[in-house]
Amino acid sequence: MADPSTLRYRVASLEDVPHLQALIDRSVRELQIDDYTPAQIDEALRTYLSLDTQLIADQTYFVVENDSGDLIASGGWSKRRTLCGGDTSPDAAENPVGRDASLLDPARDAAKIRAFYVHPEWARRGIGSKILDLCENAARAAGFTRFEMGATLTGVPLYARHGYIEIERFGLPLPSGDSLTVVRMLKGN
């Protein structure tokens, strides 16, 4: 395995989409299995835990490549109201925490930290922390002083280590009638 110091962090492009979809699937299936059932994971991958190409279009989504050029992690931030979810998530009209592409006001609103995925072989090596730092710095440069996210149970420890505070837990409704527990977290004044 390559040395983490040789990793390349860059803004995602549409050419990355097939690789991101594969990364998301593997990351969720292998890293979230202790927090969600296989059925919840299957349904979540078809709905909320899917790629959000709006982040790529906004150039607020980062990818990480190893020295072989393989995508091994991703994560981003958003200047839009959507708290969590991807292209296949219900929109806000169908679900109160669904997709809403309206823009946030940096003077009043918190930037949204979104869609972090790490290849299981690269997990717990500081990559997620580095992406989080890139996201917060980019959002600050856009005028935001607060950050909010809808974290999976698996991600809560990482975000808590970086000063995020749990605000509430809620369930995202899945097609089967089950739900996916998500934790709304906040950082900043």
Image: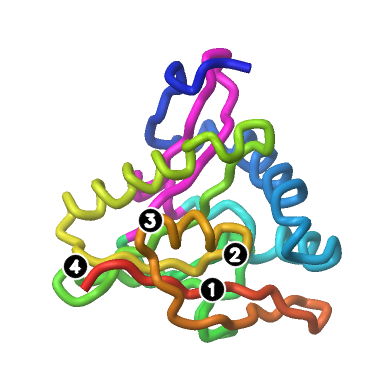
- Contact, mark 2 vs mark 1 (Cβ under 8 Å): yes
Q: Which mark is residue 162?
A: 3
Q: Mark 1 or mark 4: which comes first in sequence?
A: 4
Q: Which residue is mark 2?
A: 152
For marks 4 and 2, give the CA distance: 25 Å
Using the image, tell me which numbered label, if any, was put on residue 183. 1
* Three-letter amino acid code of the residue under disc 3: His
**First in sequence: mark 4 or mark 2?**
4
Instruction: Please state which amino acid type lies under the numbered disc 1.
Output: Val
Label 2 to label 1, Cα distance in Å?
6 Å
Q: Position of residue 105 (x, y in %)?
A: 20, 71
Apparent side of residue 187 relative to residue 65 in the rendered image (left or right) = left
Magenta segment boundaries in residue numbering: 54-78
| Number of residues whose C-alpha sits closer than 10 Å to that of mark 3, classed few (under 14), some (14–19) or many (20 or more) | few
- Up-down relation of residue 183 to residue 160 (above or below): below
- Residue 113: percent from the left, percent from the top? 40, 59
Taking the spot 68% from the left edge, 45% from the top edge, the residue there is 27
Q: Quadrant of residue 95?
A: bottom right
| Whether residue 56 is visible | yes
Q: Residues within 10 Å of mark 4 (few under 14, many from 20)?
A: some
